[in-house]
Amino acid sequence: MRVLVTGSSGQIGTNLALRLQRVGHSVFGVDKRQNTWTDEFPYLLQDLAGHYPSFAGGIGGVEYPEVDVVVHLAAHAKVHQLVRQPHRALENAIMTFNVLEYCRQIGVPLVFSSSREVYGDVHRFEEYGEGIADFAYTESPYSASKITSEAFIYSYARCYGLDYLVFRFSNVYGRFDNDLHRMPRVLPLWIHQISRGEPITVYGGDEKVLDFTYVDDCIDGIARGVDALARGRVANETINLAYGQGNTLVRAAELIGAALDIEPQIAFASSLLGEVTHYVADIRKARELLGWEPTTPLEEGIPRAVGWFRDWRAAHPEEDRPIVDGWAAGEVEHGCKQPAAAGA
Ligand SMILES: NC(=O)c1ccc[n+]([C@@H]2O[C@H](COP(=O)([O-])OP(=O)(O)OC[C@H]3O[C@@H](n4cnc5c(N)ncnc54)[C@H](O)[C@@H]3O)[C@@H](O)[C@H]2O)c1
C-alpha cells in the first residue's frame, strides 16, 4: 500500500511510518518540521494549516505521490498549550479540513487521530464506550479541535461517501517522544527529571488515573486499521486504542524510579485547567473489529521506555539540560493563569 502520513515528524507519525515501511508499505510523510529522529522515510515540509484554494495532486496543489490511504496525525497536540493559544486548536480543525478535501477530491479513505479528550472529564468513573462522547462536555480547546475534526469527518462520510476510521488514543509513550523542549510529555519528562535527580510534579495528585498506551500497541492498532480500511474490511468506525487499564500518575513515577534505580522526589499540585483527570478506555471494539490486543502493561512498558530513552541520551548527551518551563516562567496569555504541566 501507498500511505500518506501527516504529522510524520511527530511521535506517532515517526513510529508508524517506520513500522509501515518495515512491513513493505510505501510511506510518504508531510510535516511542517524536520524529523529529528530519523531520515529513513521520505517526507515533504509543508504547513497543512494554510487556507488552500487547490487540492489537485496534493494539499495546496503541491504534487504528492499517488496514495491508497491517508493517516492524518498532524496537530498541535499539547492540551495546555492550546488553553494558552486557542488559535492553534482552530489550526487543528483547518488541517483536518484540508486533509478531508484532499481525500474527497482524490477518493481515498482516511484514518484520523482523535483523543480520549473528546470524552471530557464529566463522566469520571463511568465506562468509556465510544458512544458516550458528548460535545456539551468539551474540556478544552484541544478537545474542541478533536470533536470538530471528528464531526467534519462524519459529515464527509454522509455527504460525500468518504470512508474513514477514527482512533481515539490515550497517553502514548515509549519511543520517539523525548523532544522535551518542543513537547514535554509526562513520562519522558519524568524519566529526564528523575534521572537528573530533579523533583517532579504530579498535577492532580494520587487520584489522577490515566490509561497509558505503550507505543507498539498503539502502532499495531493503527497499522491494522490502515490495512482493514484500505482493503474495505472495516470502515466508518470510531475506535478507542489504549491499553484498557487505569494507572495513577504516582504509580507511573514509581515505576520510572524503579527502572532508573532512583527514588523519585514527588511534589503534588492541583489539577490543571482543561485537564482530564480520570480515563480508562473501553477497548472491546478494537478487539472485535481489528483482532487487536494490547500486549504491554505499564510495568513492562516503562522499563522499555526508560531503556530507549537512556540509549538515545547516551548518543545525544547535549540533550541532558534542564527543560525550560515557559508556562511557569510567566508565559501566560488570555488570562488563564495556570502552572505548567506535561500533557499527552
Ligand atoms: N501521543 C499521544 O499520547 C496522543 C494521544 C491522543 C491523541 N493524539 C493525537 O495523535 C496525533 C499524533 O500525536 P503525536 O503525539 O505524534 O504528536 P506530535 O506533536 O509528536 O506530532 C504531531 C506533528 O504534527 C505536526 N504539525 C503540527 N502542525 C502542523 C502543520 N500546521 N502542518 C504540518 N504539520 C504540523 C508537528 O510538527 C508534529 O510533528 C495528534 O493528532 C494528537 O493530537 C496523540
Image (spheres, grey):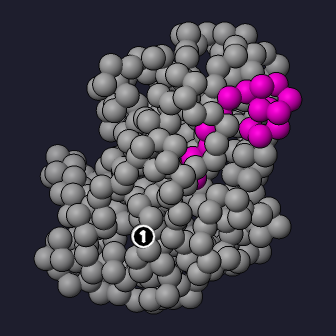
Q: Residue at x 61, y 67 (%)?
A: 128
Q: Amino acid at mark 1?
A: Gln
Residue 155 falls inside the magenta stretch = yes
Q: Residue at x 37, y 28 (%)?
A: 20
Please report the bounds of the magenta region as a residue range. Answer: 153-169
Extreme residue in the front direction: 288
Image location (x, y in percent) of residue 264: 26, 83
Residue 320 visible in rendering: no
**In this orientation, which residue lies closer to the viewer: 130 or 21?**
130
- Corner quadrant of residue 127: bottom right
Q: Is residue 334 placed above or below 222 in the rendered structure?
A: below
Image location (x, y in percent) of residue 35: 41, 34
Extreme residue in the right direction: 159
Q: Is residue 306 placed above or below 101 in the rendered structure?
A: below
Q: From the viewer's perspective, tell me whether residue 229 is left or right of residue 267.
A: right
Q: From the viewer's perspective, tell me whether residue 125 is left or right of residue 246.
A: right
**In this figure, which residue is indicated by the disc labeled 1?**
245
Residue 138 visible in rendering: yes
Quadrant in which the N terminus appears: top left
Image location (x, y in percent) of residue 160: 82, 25
**In this orientation, which residue lies closer to the viewer: 29 or 184?**
29
Q: Residue at x 82, y 19 (%)?
A: 53
Image location (x, y in percent) of residue 108: 64, 20
Q: From the viewer's perspective, tell me whether residue 327 is left or right of residue 313.
A: right
**What is the crowding at mark 1: few (fewer than 14 residues within 10 Å), some, or many (at least 20)?**
some
Residue 277 falls inside the magenta stretch = no
Q: What kind of element bears circle 1?
A: loop
**In this orientation, which residue lies closer to the viewer: 224 or 148?**
224
**In this orientation, which residue lies closer to the viewer: 79 or 128?**
128
- Corner quadrant of residue 213: bottom left
